[in-house]
Every structure is written in C-alpha cells, then in structure tokens.
Image (tube, helix red, strand yellow):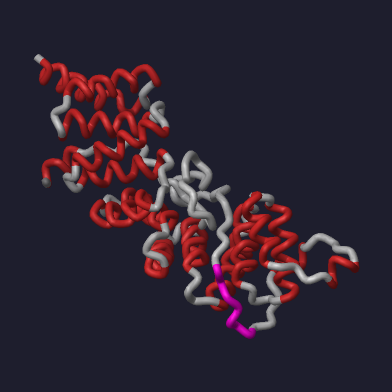
C-alpha cells in the first residue's frame, strides 16, 4: 500500500469549488466554478430552508444598494416562491431585488440572507458575504447550506482550516451534501490527506456531483489508498464527462500502468493524452509510463 501511494503522482489536480445548490439534480461541467482553492466561484445559489429565529434588527448591507422600487412594490409582500424562482433562473439581479425585499420584510430571513450573501460573494465583496452568512447561521444554526457557503468565504481568505470546519459542519447537518463533500475533498487532496478525501468525495459522487474536477480528485484519492478498481470506475465515468481533460488522462494512465498493470489500456489513454497535448511539465512522467507499458506488452 505504501509503495502504491509513493508511486502516485498528481498533476494539476483541480479543486472544483461550488456554491451550495438547491436542486437535487446532478452536477456536470463547471457550474460551480473553479479556482485553485483561494478563488471565487460563479456557481449557483442555494435554496435552503433557513428559519428566522434571531431577533436582531440590524439591517443587512443589501439595503444600501437595493434598486429603487415603486410605491406599489414597496407595500406588496414578497413570498419565498419569488426567491426560489429567481434562484432557479440564476438571475443575479432578480435574486438581489427579491432577497432585498424579503429582508425588508424580515431582516432575519435565513434563505434571503444566504442568497444575498452569495450575490455579494460573486461580486467579490467577501466581507459583506461573510457578514450575511454569519447572520444566516445565527438565524438558523441548522442551515447546512450557509455553512457550506461560509466555507467558500474562508477559502477566499486563505483560511483552509476554517473552510474545512465549515464544510464538515455542512456535512454533519446533511450527510448527503455533495457540494460540501466535493469542496472538502478538493482541500484534502491538495493536502494529501487521501483517506479523508475518499470519505467526503464519496458523498459528492453518490450525490451526483460528477464534474470532471471532482471525479479527478476522487480518482486520485482512491488510487492513493489502493482502491484501484473503484478508481478505475471513477475514471471511466470521468472520461464520459470529459475525455479531453489532460489531468484526468494522465492520472488515469498512472492508475492503469503503474498500479493495475493494464498496459494496453494505459497506452490507449496515453495516446489520447498525446493527441490532446500533454502538460509540458509532465513530459518525463509520460515517457516513463510509456516505456513501462511497452515493456509490459512485450
């Protein structure tokens, strides 16, 4: 096992960073955005069921920048359905307007606070996002989505430990939170804590988070802990999602050639990688893999 882990080489392992999502649909592509841990995400907002238990009257920062409304709009109550629709449509300005109106009606509306926080997060206003998420969590300490989004704020602030704690709290509140699992897993893989990575990335995988970056991270982690057959299945799924991804191709070739002695299959993957164009820094690694596969096929 130790040798297997030592042999593993990770090339440009991607960290898919997602904002919490409301729907239970499978996640493919880059809808959650990507950054090397400390970046922002352009992902979807969540639609958690946060409550409004807090009695604080402090108005959120959203009130300062809210668009002007007509008198009729000002007196017409806005329902949660309007925010749900805005989030489903991924209309940022509609989310902002609707959340602002909901917060005017109830400054401690957890769902509106969470949605408004991620609006500011996408705009790069991290302090405002953190403030609103703190209020959302105070309004409902069981708001798993708010903890997951707070983890993103910590990542942007280079606070990995706090980010992990937030993602793990989100998972404690919802054991099937695939987005929190994917985000926590990306950090664990970077830190080479593969056993923990496997645990949380399995949650993401089972929840249907199947973007190429999360699948690549999961495959790397499974390979590192010696679960080669499972890693092979994950890479097969990843190839269906994105068979031109250079990191997936290289890590899959490492699995097939170095760990499973499947030289023909490994050569096929390497040939695909060479066709796509391998990363320049992996040239020597590819040559070594190719030589080993050719020797094994003799």
Horizontal relation, residue 44 to residue 276: left or right: right
Q: Quadrant of the C terminus?
A: top left
Please name whichever residue, 266 or 25, is drawn nearer the observer in this view of the structure. 25
Q: Which residue is depicted at the point 64% across and 50% down?
A: 90
Does the image show residue 161? Answer: no
Q: Is residue 53 magenta?
A: yes
* Residue nearer the viewer, 60 or 98: 98
- Residue at image location 53% in from the left, 73% down from the top: 137
Q: Is residue 139 magenta?
A: no
Q: Position of residue 64 (x, y in %)?
A: 77, 67
Q: Is residue 25 visible?
A: yes
Q: Residue furthest right?
A: 71
Left/right of residue 184 with respect to residue 52 in the rendered view: left
Task: Please report the residue visible at 63 percent of the width from the left and 55 percent of the height from the top.
Answer: 87
Image location of residue 111, percent across then percent down: 60, 67
Q: Is residue 219 above or below residue 136?
A: above
Q: Residue 173, image x and y in percent? A: 41, 69
- Residue interval drawn in magenta: 49-55
260 with respect to 282 (left or right) = left
The rendered magenta stretch, by its main secondary structure, is classed as loop
Task: Residue 167: give x, y in percent of width and height.
Answer: 41, 62
């Amino acid at each position: 096992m130790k040798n297997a882990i030592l042999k593993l080489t990770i090339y440009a392992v991607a960290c898919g960073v997602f904002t919490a999502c409301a729907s239970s649909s499978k996640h493919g592509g880059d809808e959650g955005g990507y950054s090397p841990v400390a970046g922002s995400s352009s992902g979807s907002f969540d639609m958690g069921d946060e409550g409004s238990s807090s009695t604080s009257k402090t108005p959120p920062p959203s009130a300062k920048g809210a668009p002007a409304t007509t008198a009729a709009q000002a007196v017409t109550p806005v329902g949660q359905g309007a925010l749900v629709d805005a989030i489903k449509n991924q209309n940022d300005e509609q989310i902002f307007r609707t959340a602002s109106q909901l917060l005017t009606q109830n400054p401690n509306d957890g769902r509106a606070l969470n949605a408004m926080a991620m609006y500011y997060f996408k705009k790069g206003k991290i302090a405002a996002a953190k403030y609103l998420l703190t209020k959302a969590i105070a309004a409902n300490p069981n708001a798993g989505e708010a903890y997951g989004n707070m983890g993103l704020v910590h990542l942007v602030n280079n606070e990995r430990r706090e980010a992990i704690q937030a993602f793990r709290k989100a998972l404690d509140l919802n054991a099937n939170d695939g987005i929190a699992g994917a985000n926590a897993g990306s950090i664990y893989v970077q830190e080479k804590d593969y056993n923990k990575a496997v645990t949380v990335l399995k949650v993401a995988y089972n929840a249907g988070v199947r973007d190429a970056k999360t699948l690549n991270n999961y495959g790397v982690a499974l390979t590192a802990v010696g679960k080669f057959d499972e890693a092979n299945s994950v890479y097969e799924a990843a190839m269906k999602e994105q068979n031109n991804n250079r990191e997936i191709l290289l890590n899959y070739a490492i699995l097939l050639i170095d760990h499973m002695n499947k030289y023909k299959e490994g050569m096929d993957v390497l040939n695909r990688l060479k066709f796509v164009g391998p990363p320049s820094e992996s040239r020597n690694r590819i040559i070594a893999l190719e030589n080993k596969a050719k020797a094994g096929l003799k």
